[in-house]
């Protein structure tokens, strides 16, 4: 599978170095106070709403809790978070379970022979 090459923003003068974004060498320190305030509010909205990505089916209460945790993290000064990593064994087990579920779903309306064949394949996994 070919991966899409990421666009090199420096070709158009846009750069981010050590967490600082500049456009042709000008950055946030070159902007007016009103512009900085606009960007801060816009950025806060983007950060908080992006925490809801993938949570479309959650209740409003659950969504509120997700945004609340993110806001608290920001208010606390963005302390370093521990990444939840999946062990190779857990990942393999999860992938196997997902594969089996997908195989069974694929033949759910299939013939008895197709179902038997899938179960034989699963038993050898």
Image (tube, helix red, strand yellow):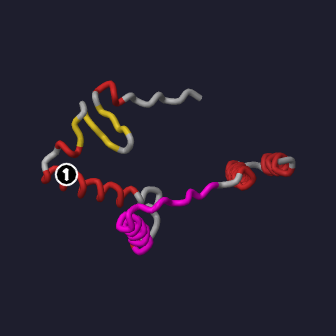
Q: Nearer the viewer, residue 55 or 43?
A: 43
Residue 13 visible to the viewer: yes
Residue found at x 24% / y 33%: 25
User: Is 41 situated left or right of 103 in this image?
Assistant: left
User: Left or right: where does residue 11 sit relative to residue 111?
Assistant: left
Position of residue 3 measured from the top left corner of the image (x, y, whole percent): 53, 30
Q: What span is colored magenta in the figure?
A: 61-85
* Magenta stretch: includes residue 119: no
Identified at 37% across, 38% down, the residue is 17
* Above/below status of 42 relative to 30: below
Label 1 residue SS: helix
Extreme top residue here? 11
* Predominant SS of the magenta segment: helix
Residue farthest bottom in this picture: 61
Q: What residue is shown with label 1?
A: 36
Write the residue at 22% across / 36% down: 26
Is 68 a magenta residue? yes
Q: Quadrant of residue 68?
A: bottom left
Q: Tell me: 30 left or right of 101.
A: left
Residue at position x 13%, y 53% in the image: 34
Provide residue 35's location: percent of width, then percent of height: 16, 50
Q: Dividing the image into 4 quarters, which one contains the N terminus?
A: top right
Count how many numbered circles sit on residues in the image: 1
Q: Residues within 10 Å of mark 1 (few under 14, many from 20)?
A: some
Judging depth in this view, the residue of 120 and 41 nearest the camera is 41
Residue 58 % position (x, y): 46, 67
Quarter occupied by residue 10: top left
The answer to whether residue 109 shows anywhere in this view is no
Out of 46 and 82, give the one closest to the viewer: 82
């Amino acid at each position: 599978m070919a991966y899409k090459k990421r666009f090199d923003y420096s070709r158009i003068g846009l750069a981010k170095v050590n967490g600082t974004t500049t456009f042709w060498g000008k950055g946030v320190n070159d902007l007016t106070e009103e512009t900085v305030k606009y960007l801060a509010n816009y950025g806060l909205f983007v950060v908080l709403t992006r925490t809801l990505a993938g949570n479309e089916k959650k209740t409003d209460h659950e969504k509120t809790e997700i945004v609340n945790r993110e806001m608290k993290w920001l208010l606390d000064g963005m302390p370093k978070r521990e990444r939840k990593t999946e062990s190779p064994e857990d990942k393999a087990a999860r992938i196997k379970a997902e594969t089996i579920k997908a195989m069974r779903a694929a033949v759910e309306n299939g013939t008895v022979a197709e179902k038997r064949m899938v179960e034989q394949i699963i038993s050898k996994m």
